[in-house]
Each structure stands twice: as structure tokens, then as C-alpha cells.
Amino acid sequence: MGLIVQKFGGTSVATAEKIRAAAQRAVAAKRDGHHVVMVVSARGKKTDELLTLAAELTDAPPRREMDMLLSTGEQESVALMSMAIQELGEPAISLTGGQIGIITDSQHSKARIRQISIERMRRHLADGTIVVACGFQGVDDEGNITTLGRGGSDTTATALAAVLKADECQIYTDVEGVFTTDPRIVKGARKINTVSHDEMLELASLGAGVMHSRSIEFAKKFDVPLRVRPSFSDGLGTLIAPHGEEHAPVVTGLALVRKESRVTLADLPDRPGVMSVIFAKLAHRKIPVDMVVQNVGTDDTAEVSFTVPEDDLAATLTAAQDAIQELGAGSVHSGTNVAKLSAVGDGMRSHSGVAAQMFRSLADAGVNIEMITTSDIKISVLVNRDDADKSLQTVHAGFGLDQADARTPSIGYRQSPSVPTTEGSLESQVVGSLANMEDLVVSDVDLDERQSRISIHHIPDTPGVCADLFEAVAEGDVMVDMIVQNISRQGSAEVSFTVLRDDIDRCLLLVREVVSQWEGAELSYDREIDKLTVTGIGLRSHTGVGEMLFRALADADVNVQMINTSEVRLSVVVGADRGQQAAASLHTAFARSDEQ
Ligand code: ASP
Ligand code: MG
């Protein structure tokens, strides 16, 4: 016997018929011998309707009243759901956030959970009653109703699963599960059976997710197995849980962000603190920056390029102008007709040649790569937007993602003691951390002193160049770590990457041979560089992280040579003589932010 949390979103409870179908799921799980907690969202477009209604009365609805209003959507759903379950012959009770004891802070419309009491749920579950909980809501210390932000029911479900130590948290939705990529663009897209929390965080933040990132962060932190399941069929959906060791796929899924813009700040002074100024300006305007590429300067100027969502371009250009003004030098350039394609997979950590394979697929399709960045489980490329669909299709096929998934779906539940008790400190441990879940969580700052950097300047800006380069390296079985590539304004490209110091001589031999074919290309390298990696959660969704990182490095007078960012990891390459200093500075900066 286990404990299952089942969450039903708005579309899955839109009509009486759908409510009955959802009730049947809960009843079936109960009859299978499980304790069942349901979390239900407002029906259909209810929340939107209530928002519209309020907007008809006032331009500035008081936020307390707004939460009072919006929370009714969920209250309606749980009452109906409980009736439907009872009609099917099982005991059920509907509970509001306040009745359960979900205590939040007082930030109306974006409250954070502080504490969850499991006492009452436990009592009902022990009686064999199905608990039907309102998603999206809680109460503050004064008893005022609060809501957790749009899509917050996922977060309620995951948080309840965490405090109850549920065996599985099932998110019922109107799709079959998580797909290898958007099936509307790629016919061969397949449903994924298992995706890890990290992979899902990356995919979700790249717009491919069916779930709210915040709830995946909860699940990762508290080790909650999540399952995204279709509400319209018996499909097993997608399990979000760590891959079994032998099964981490090299590439799990691809995401495409079509409306990207690319911004370059050039002719910048090449000294510590420059990036810090730029990123502070961007963070100040809450602009989510991605694909940061700072190539090693060849003259005494520095250049940095990055991508931002197209909607943020105007604000970004203003911020960039501000930065240049403050720095006293520099120029701003931007390009709009670009799209970002990313491949994500845990197995990239231990496989060489993944990037080479992706670049080859693109080259074969005649697609030119404008920018490249990689992190440990992600490779992102920027391409012309007109090539976006073609790129997605060709890379999907190139990685064999349209082949049937060989991994066996896991259908069993992790077994655990039946009803959790309030004894012990689990509840307080979990809720203690929940309060900080939305904050930035930095778990580690790591200094890697075994890396070298190789850069190639003035390479031709044509399809296939990076494919040739990284294929040669992969054939020599050299594991490439970070890759950044950018097109300079002169129309040639520059690429830098890191390899282990032990591999650099072998790698240089392979690279020289390829580079000799490109007229005007120049090779430079640094045998000893240090790589610093900050690991945590929400590193990219928190716009201030880059600022904090660059501030800390600037304060320590450290010049940054390469950068890359992902949801869970942020890496910078610095000179080997500065590594220790930089690490100490980052430790201090992030430890301070953790305590706040
Ligand atoms: N009803 C809320 C919303 O529409 C919460 C949810 O559906 O998760 O955002
Ligand atoms: Mg919803």
C-alpha cells in the first residue's frame, strides 16, 4: 500500500463528465490499496473568467480581494469532485488550503508556502477517506486567503507529495506526456517514458515543458517522483525521476525557442568588472539572458553576445546603452530573425561526440550555426529562424529520437509505510526548506583545475565548420567540455572549448589538421585554465544570478574568459592563476545569498 497524490488541471475537470472520470481515477487508486490525495484546479477557464470580471470593475483590484476571488474556482472544483467520489461509493472530503493548514507568506497572488500541516490529511487518510485538496491556495498567518501564482496547483500537488512522502505525484493533463520535441513540428516526436528532474527543468525553461518549473524544483529537492499522465486515456505518461544508472540517454529531448534575439556588445574594455556592469543593468530590468558567449579577446577589446526573448529586446538595448555609457566605450549590435534549438540529456555528461553529431546533422541540412553554448546536459545553437523547423527535424532524426524508446516504462510505485505519522521532524524539515524554494538555491561552487582552453579565431562562417572540427576531436576520443561559438561582426566565426589538460596535446594535433584547411584561421590555446561551476536550482530563471556572479568575480579582480549558463549550473573559465581567488569569492557571495 502506498500514498498517491493525483493532480487534475482545469481542462481535466471542465465538465461533469470529466469530473466523474477524474473521480474514477482516484477511486481506482484507492481500490488498488493506496491512500489517495487529490489536488484539483479551477474548472476550465474559470480563473481567467474571474480575472476578466474583476477587470471590468477596476483597473487595480486589491490583491487581497483578488486572491479571495480566484480561490473560489478551486473551491468549486473540490466540492464537485468530492460529491462525484462519494457517488461512486467511496468516502471523500474536500478541503481548502486553509482547512488543510497550508500556511503561506502574505504576498497575495504570488505567495510562497511556509508550512503544511499534515495532521488533518493524515487523520482522513487513516479512515480510508480520499482527501480532495484545493490547489493554488493557502492562508497567511492572519487567515487571509492567498494564492501561489498562475499554474500554482502543480506546486500544491508536489508540496503535498513532499510533506506526505508520497510514493508518486501524478499530474493529469490533456497530453500523453512529455515528448522528445514538439509533435506539431516533428512528426516522429515520441512520448518519453522517463526524464530526470534536471532534464525536465532544462526542457521546461526552454518552453517545452507541460509543467510549472517551480513544482519540478520541489520534486527534485524532495525526491518526489512525478508522473505526467494523460487524463483522457490509460497511458502511463512520463515519469520524472532520476534515470537508472545504466539508462541515462545521451539526448532525451529537444526544445525550440523561436522568438529569440541576439545582442552583441563589442569594442568593450577588456578588464575585470565589465561583464558585471552589463549584467547588473540587465538584471535590473529583469531580463532573462541566455546563451552568453564571451570569446577570448584577440586585441585589447572584449566582446560579449547573448540571447534574450524577442519581447525583451527593446528593454535589453536600453540596458546595453546604459552599460556602455557607464563603461565609457563599446557598441551595441542586435539581430532578430533567430531561433534557439537545444538538445538536453543526462548522458551527455559521460559521452563524447554528442555536439559533433548535432553539428553534423545541421551541416547536412545546410543550416549555418550562428552561436553555440553548451552546459553539462545541454547543447544550444542559434540558427536563422527560417531554418528553425528544418533544424529541429534534422537534429531529432540525427539523434535517433524517432526510434522506439528501448527503456522499459516503470509502472510500479516505490513502496513505503502506509500513512505517514507526524512523528519525527520530517514535516518541519521539509517545510523549513519549502519556505526558500522559490529563492535561489545554490548548492555548490566547484573549482576544476584540470582544464585547458583551445580557441580558433577567424573560421569561415559557413555550415559544417563546427561539425568538421568537433568530429575530428570526437574521433580522437577527446572529451570536450564547454563549447562557445560566436559569429564576429566581421563575418567570421570564433570558437572556444575546454578539454582536460591531459588531452590537450592530442587534441591540438587533431585540431591543427582541420584548422589548416581554413585560410586565415588562427589557433590559440591556454594549457592551464580553471573552470568554476556554480550548481543550484533556478540559476537561469533568477535574473540576478549572473549579476551576482560577475560582481563577485569583478570584486576579486578576475577576468572572465568563457561563460555558460543552464537552469542548474553556471560555469565560467578564468585564468589558472585566478582560480582559487575566484572560487573563494564565489563561495562568499553565494553563501551570503543563501542566508538571506
Ligand atoms: N487555477 C489556477 C490557474 O489557472 C491554478 C492552476 O490551474 O494551477 O492558474
Ligand atoms: Mg492550470
Image (cartoon, rainbow, N blue to C red):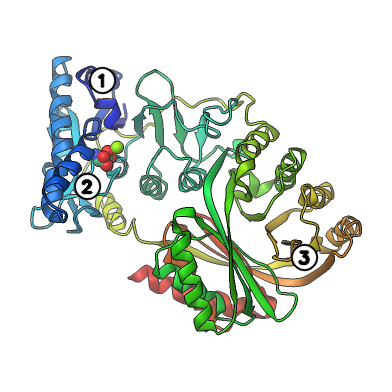
Residue at mark 3: C-beta within 8 A of ligand 2: no
Q: Which mark is residue 454?
A: 3
* Res 227 → quadrant: top left
Q: Amino acid at mark 2?
A: Glu
Residue drawn 55% across the image and 35% down it = 181
Name which residue lies at 45% across and 40% down.
Answer: 209
Frontmost residue, 332 versus 223: 332
Measure how far apart labels 2 and 1 are at the Cα level: 38 Å
The correct choice, above or below, for 282 with respect to 506 in the image is below
- Quarter holding residue 4: top left
Whether the residues at callouts 3 and 1 have beta carbons within 8 Å, the answer is no
Locate residue 381, reporting x and y percent.
64, 50
Q: Quick check: 85 left or right of 463?
A: left
Q: Is ligand 1 less than 8 Å from the beta carbon at label 2?
A: no
Q: CA distance from mark 3 to mark 1?
A: 58 Å
- What is the spatial separation of the Cα atoms under label 3 and label 2, in whole angstroms? 56 Å
Residue furthest to the top in view is 88
Label 2 sits on residue? 423
Q: Which mark is residue 18?
A: 1
Query: What is the three-letter code of the residue carrying label 1?
Result: Lys
Residue type at mark 3 is: Ile
Horizontally, residue 273 falls left or right of residue 521, namely left
Tell me if 294 is positioned left or right of 510 in this view: left
- The spot of residue 595 in percent (x, y) is 35, 70
Mark 2 or mark 1, whichever is nearer to me: 1
